[in-house]
Structure formats: C-alpha cells, structure tokens
Amino acid sequence: MTWPNVGIALSFRQTVISLTLGWLALMVVAPHALVLMTSVMTPNSEHLAVWPLTFDGYLKVMQPIYFDVFFQSLWLSGVATLFCLLIGYPFAYVLAKQPPWLRTVLLVLMMLPFWTNSLIRTYAMKLILGKKGIINTALVGSGIIEKPITMLYTEFAVIVGLVYILLPFMVLPLMASFEKLSNELVEASRDLGANGVQRFFTILLPLTAPGIVAGCLIVFLPAMGMFYVADLLGGAKNLLLGNVIKNQFLVVRDWPFGSAFSITLIVMMAGLLWVYALANRFVQRQGGLDDENL
C-alpha cells in the first residue's frame, strides 16, 4: 500500500471513530449526564428541577412505601425472565442444531412479530386474555369451563405479556452459545458413560452460562421498564419500576425523583453486567483448566 493510500485509510478510520464517539457522547453520555444531574436537584412545579443540589430523590427511593413496588417489579420481571429461560433454552438448542436454511426460516418466523409495534401487540394480548377473548371463548365453547376465567388485569397477564415480547431476546444469545459449543465434548462425555442429565449439568449448562446470563440480562432489565405492559394488561394494579418513573415524569412532575429512580435502574444494570462478566470469566477459566487436563 502506497503512502497516499495509507494516509487516506488512516484519515477515514479517524473520521469514523470521531463520528462514532461524537454520536455516543451526544446520544448516550449527555442524556445520562442530564439525568444524573437532575436526580440531585430540587423539584419545582414551574421549572421542574432547580438548585440547590440535594439527595432527597435517592432518599425517597429508599422509603418503605416504594419497597412493595420495587419487590413486585423484581418479582414480575424475575418470573418473566425464568419463563423465557425455560422456553428459550430448549428452543435455542433445537434451533442451533438445524440446517442453516431451516434455522434461517425459524429465526425469521420468530422475529416476524417485531415487524409490528410492541404496543400494538400488547393491545392484541388484551383480545386474547380478556373474558370475551379468544382463550375464554374457546374454553367456554368447548365446555371445559362454564364461566370465563379472569386472566386480564392480573399478574398472570403481565407475565404473559412480558414473556411474549421479550422471548426472542432470550433465544438469540442462547443460540449463539449453542453454536459455539463443540459437539466433540458432548460426544466424549457420552463415550465415557455420562447420561443425559450428567451431560447437561457438566457440559451444556456450564459452557452456555454466558448465554444464559446475557439472555437473562437482556430480558430482566427491559422487563422492569415496560410500563405500558403493566398498564394495559395489569390494569395499573401490578406496577413495574417503569410505571413509577413514568408517573413521576408525566403525572407528578417530580423530575428529580424520577431521575433518581432511573439512576437506580442503571446501577442495577451495572451490577448485573458485572455478574455476566464473572460468569464469562468463570467459563473461560474452566475451559482453560479442561485444556490443561487434556
């Protein structure tokens, strides 16, 4: 490569890096910095947030009145994440073992609902879970039940809605982990006499742990912020942290408190990412030990 071409390549790389860093600074760093600054300001009905600086917003987050909302949000998000894992793990395993053309078709079918806005799909769930919805109509019409079952505006409806929306985000990282999994390890364990349960707990589960943790992160964190799912399917009786943040910004107009709640979520996300890094490091260390033993 001649010197002019090298200069053009370096200039292009520097331009791309500068544009990327500028976009990140403008669209990621600056908004988060504004939220952080707002979280330590004083609420004001006219100007939303004013001086002086105070930590009252964070003290409100720790008030017992919000503990129920906090734990309920963790409960709903955790249960939805668990169901996504139980459904997505075997599905991702089967998907990863398919021929490339069939895997592509199945992936397209799985992602097809994303062509429609998630809010519209949540409204569609109301038509399915309502007392006059598809499920109750089918059950009553077949004589299995006499009266419609109350499913809408319950925790069950919120969990179903979260699983329906977030399941693909669990499947994709799990499928990536299964694709990286060496079949030689599974075959070797089978040759050594390990049964299916032993192969699962000694081979599959440890080596797919990063995919499990990544999928749980990608599902768990957004689940806590999907306030419209709780509003539409839970009837505002089963709140998520996103509902509290939305109400503080749009209803109560207490922006510092809403910002403090948002920062709390970010800190939780950082903690879960740390857990993911530990799980990934553990798997890599185990792989290194296995290689040494070989």
Image: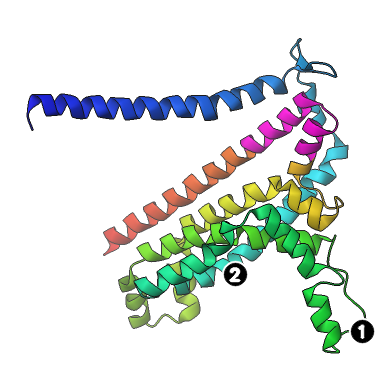
Vertical placement of residue 71 versus 257, above or below = below
Task: Please give the name of the residue rendered at 71% of the width and 23% of the height, measured from the top-left corner.
Answer: 39
Instruction: Count residues near mark 1 (Cα–Cα under 10 Å), then give few for <14, some for 14-19, many for 20+.
Output: few
Task: Please give the name of the residue rendered at 83% of the width and 52% of the height, measured from the top-left corner.
Answer: 238
- Is residue 207 in view? no
Vertical placement of residue 23 versus 108, above or below = above
Residue 155: give x, y in percent of width and height.
81, 60
Task: Please give the name of the residue rendered at 82% of the width and 56% of the height, measured from the top-left corner.
Answer: 234
Task: Please give the name of the residue rendered at 57% of the width and 51% of the height, measured from the top-left corner.
Answer: 218
Residue 85: give x, y in percent of width and height.
59, 64
Q: Give the range drawn in magenta.
A: 244-267
> What label sits on residue 146 in the rendered view?
1
Q: Which of marks 2 and 1 is in front?
A: 1
Q: Is mark 1 on a helix, strand or loop?
A: loop
Residue 3: give x, y in percent of width and height.
9, 25
- Under mark 1, the amino acid is Glu
Q: Is residue 259 magenta?
A: yes
Instruction: Count residues near mark 2 (Cα–Cα under 10 Å), then give few for <14, some for 14-19, many for 20+.
Output: some
Q: Name the residue under label 2.
A: 87
Most common SS among magenta residues: helix
Return the residue found at the far bottom: 143
Q: In which quarter of the image is the N terminus?
A: top left
CB contact under 8 Å: marks 2 and 1: no
- Under mark 2, the amino acid is Ile
Residue 24: give x, y in percent of width and height.
47, 29
Q: What element carries label 2?
A: helix
Between residue 229 and residue 191, name the one nearer to us: 229
117 displayed left or right of 228: left
Between residue 116 and residue 58, name the one nearer to us: 116
What is the total number of numbered labels drawn onto the structure image? 2
